[in-house]
Image (cartoon, helix red, strand yellow):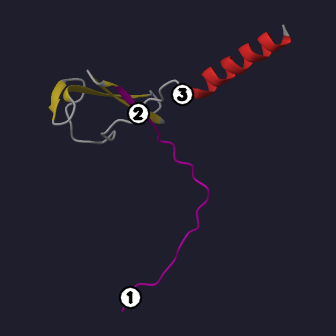
């Protein structure tokens, strides 16, 4: 009985360990500030008909860009926060 349980555990471990991860989403091929048609079907040379979509949060702290085609869905999340760490006033005399 112990051999059966051990062999089942080994088989299950090998099965889980050898499977690929749950298909991580590939990044989008365009950036959030790309000059492209958003939320419309466009013709891509490599992917064929494709829809690019971008969404901002209301505070403007992130942008989520996705592409939708027959080959699959791609997505990229971009964090847009800027943190001010410090500042220093600079004084200089005019040249001349």
- Does the magenta stretch mainly form a helix, a strand or a loop? loop
- In this figure, which residue is indicated by the disc labeled 3? 21
Horizontal arrangement in the rendering, residue 10 relative to residue 60 (left or right): right
Task: Tell me the SS state at disc 2.
Answer: loop
Quadrant occupied by the N terminus: top right
Residue at left 26%, top 42%?
34
Task: Tell me the SS state at disc 3.
Answer: loop
Quadrant occupied by the C terminus: bottom left
Alpha carbon distance from label 3 to label 1: 62 Å
82 versus 90 height, above or below: above
30 versus 13 height, above or below: below
Tell me if residue 89 is in the magenta stretch: yes
Residue 26's tag is 2
The answer to which quarter of the image holds residue 71 is top left
Mark toward the start of the polypeptide (3 vs 1): 3
- In this figure, which residue is indicated by the disc labeled 1? 95
Disc number lying in front (1 or 2): 2
Horizontal arrangement in the rendering, residue 7 relative to residue 33 (left or right): right
Alpha carbon distance from label 2 to label 3: 13 Å
Mark toward the start of the polypeptide (2 vs 3): 3
- Tell me whether circle 3 and circle 1 mark residues in contact (CB < 8 Å): no
Disc number lying in front (2 or 3): 3
Chain part drawn in magenta: 73-96
Residue 73's tag is none
Q: Position of residue 8 (x, y in %)?
A: 72, 13
Nearer to me, 7 or 30: 7
Residue farthest along the bottom direction in this orientation? 96
Nearer to me, 96 or 78: 78
Horizontal arrangement in the rendering, residue 16 relative to residue 39 (left or right): right
Task: Tell me the SS state at disc 1.
Answer: loop
């Amino acid at each position: 009985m112990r051999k059966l349980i051990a062999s089942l555990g080994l088989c299950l471990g090998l099965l889980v360990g050898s499977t690929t991860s749950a298909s991580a989403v590939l990044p989008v091929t365009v950036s959030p500030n790309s000059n492209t048609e958003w939320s419309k079907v466009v013709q891509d040379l490599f992917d064929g008909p494709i829809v690019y979509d971008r969404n901002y949060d209301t505070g403007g702290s992130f942008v989520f860009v996705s592409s939708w085609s027959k080959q699959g869905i791609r997505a990229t999340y971009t964090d847009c926060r800027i943190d001010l760490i410090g500042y220093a006033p600079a004084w200089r005399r005019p040249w001349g």
